[in-house]
Image (cartoon, rainbow, N blue to C red):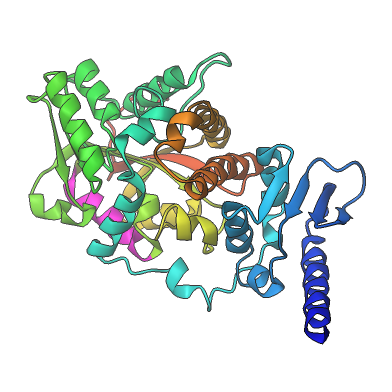
């Protein structure tokens, strides 16, 4: 009897402590429900309800708010009544109130950047299976921010727009050589070869992407124009190759903060003098450790550069910046399209993965959309020349 009373008292104390912690997110009203109790956080009509099946210890919320809430959602110990995306906009819009104990999470948030570990981390995400990605990406298989030139552009058209936009910025001419670092499934290089007749090479650490890109090259008879290699960017200097143009879309986020300078060194080593380099990457305003849940479950080892630290590193390389563009709102819209496609193909996805994975991936897609909407993360395209280039048009040509 006394043991049961003790357990009940501990549960009540844990519940009250959890609710007290959640009161920090009070900018907009929402309900917290636990068993028969409801708590209104903020003032006004609640937009959604967070239903807890069991309380989350405050010690876990303080160690990493994102991991504690994310794991509870994955395990169905936390469910959302209402729109998940809107709920995430609410919480991520107050990201500064999240807690992270970096000393306790140091190895998780700052893992080794050795080649073998980075290859394993990349493959853990991109080698889930091409059949899975084909369900919710568009037919270009572009897994990066699209570019919505018009309000009625669908996802496919927006991805075509994005690639066309990048290729225009690179000011390509027939016969030029183009390197794509982190080439994905190859759509950018395929379009460059078809439209500009360049000679291109793509590198990736993903076996699935490598196999699919090779299949596309053969299907389109582009063997005379394109090659793809399973290669770490750190091995580029050993190739002895020099390229007129280099592009990297959504890859530098995987190299780790300690290796940003090394990444740019490797680009410098293979880019001809006066050549153009376009870096397209997810950024954040400040140089912090980022989202612990994302690093643990979605992108192990991933770190997001700030714009200022990347610009600072580029200056040391004698990289002259021609243009910087922020496409944040385009990525919000891209992710909402992906999340809709994900839900539209739920029956097929359920045959591939268990419920915990599905809840994790849904949280990832909706959470990233919310993060771009609230400005927690942004996306930049930086266009540079290797040294001074006075042969380019003096106005924007794209």
- Horizontal relation, residue 253 to residue 41: left or right: left
What range is drawn magenta here?
Answer: 258-271
- Horizontal relation, residue 227 to residue 153: left or right: left
Residue depicted at x 34% and y 24%: 140
The N terminus lies in quadrant = bottom right
The C terminus lies in quadrant = top left
Residue depicted at x 61% and y 72%: 63
Residue depicted at x 83% and y 50%: 31
- Horizontal relation, residue 123 to residue 272: left or right: right
Q: Measuring from the top left, give residue 256's x and y in whole percent.
A: 38, 61
Q: In the image, is residue 294 above or below residue 345? A: below
- How many marks can you see? 0
Furthest residue in direction front, as rendered: 1
SS majority, magenta: helix
Q: In the image, is residue 109 above or below residue 302? A: below
Q: Quadrant of residue 10?
A: bottom right
Inspect this view and state whether residue 290 appears.
no
Q: Measuring from the top left, give residue 314's x and y in whole percent.
A: 36, 53
Q: Measuring from the top left, give residue 326's x and y in whole percent.
A: 52, 37
Furthest residue in direction bottom, as rendered: 2
Q: In the image, is residue 275 above or below residue 68? A: above
Q: Measuring from the top left, give residue 151's x and y in whole percent.
A: 58, 16
Residue situated in front as seen by the camera: 331 or 124: 124
């Amino acid at each position: 009897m006394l043991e049961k009373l003790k357990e009940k008292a501990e549960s009540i104390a844990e519940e009250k402590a959890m609710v007290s912690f959640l009161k920090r997110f009070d900018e907009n009203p929402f309900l917290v429900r636990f068993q028969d109790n409801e708590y209104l956080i903020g003032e006004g009509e609640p937009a959604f309800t967070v239903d807890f099946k069991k309380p989350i210890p405050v010690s876990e919320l303080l160690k990493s708010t994102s991991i504690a809430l994310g794991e509870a959602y994955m395990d169905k110990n936390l469910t959302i009544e209402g729109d998940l995306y809107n709920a995430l906009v609410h919480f991520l819009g107050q990201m500064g109130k999240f807690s992270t104990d970096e000393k306790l999470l140091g190895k998780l948030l700052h893992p080794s950047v050795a080649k073998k570990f980075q290859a394993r981390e990349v493959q853990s995400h991109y080698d889930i299976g091409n059949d899975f990605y084909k369900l919710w990406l568009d037919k270009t298989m572009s897994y990066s921010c699209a570019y919505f030139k018009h309000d009625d552009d669908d996802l496919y058209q927006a991805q075509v727009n994005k690639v066309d936009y990048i290729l225009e910025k690179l000011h390509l001419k027939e016969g030029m050589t183009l390197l794509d670092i982190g080439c994905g499934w190859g759509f950018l290089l395929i379009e460059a070869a078809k439209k500009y007749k360049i000679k291109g090479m793509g590198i990736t650490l993903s076996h699935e992407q490598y196999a699919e890109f090779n299949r596309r090259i053969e299907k389109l008879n582009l063997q005379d124009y394109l090659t793809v290699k399973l290669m770490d960017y750190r091995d580029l200097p050993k190739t002895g190759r020099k390229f007129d143009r280099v592009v990297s879309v959504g890859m530098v986020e995987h190299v780790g903060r300690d290796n940003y300078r090394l990444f740019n060194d490797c680009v410098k080593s293979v880019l001809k003098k006066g050549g153009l380099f376009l870096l397209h990457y997810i950024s954040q305003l400040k140089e912090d450790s980022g989202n612990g849940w994302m690093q643990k479950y979605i992108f192990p080892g991933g770190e997001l550069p700030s714009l200022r630290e990347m610009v600072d590193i580029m200056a040391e390389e004698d990289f002259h910046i021609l243009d910087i563009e922020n496409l944040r709102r385009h990525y919000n819209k891209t992710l909402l399209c992906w999340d809709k496609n994900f839900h539209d193909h739920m029956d097929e996805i359920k045959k591939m993965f268990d419920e915990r994975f599905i809840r994790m991936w849904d949280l990832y897609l909706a959470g990233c959309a919310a993060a771009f909407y609230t400005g927690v993360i942004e996306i930049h395209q930086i266009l540079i020349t290797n040294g001074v280039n006075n042969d380019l048009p003096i106005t924007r040509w794209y």
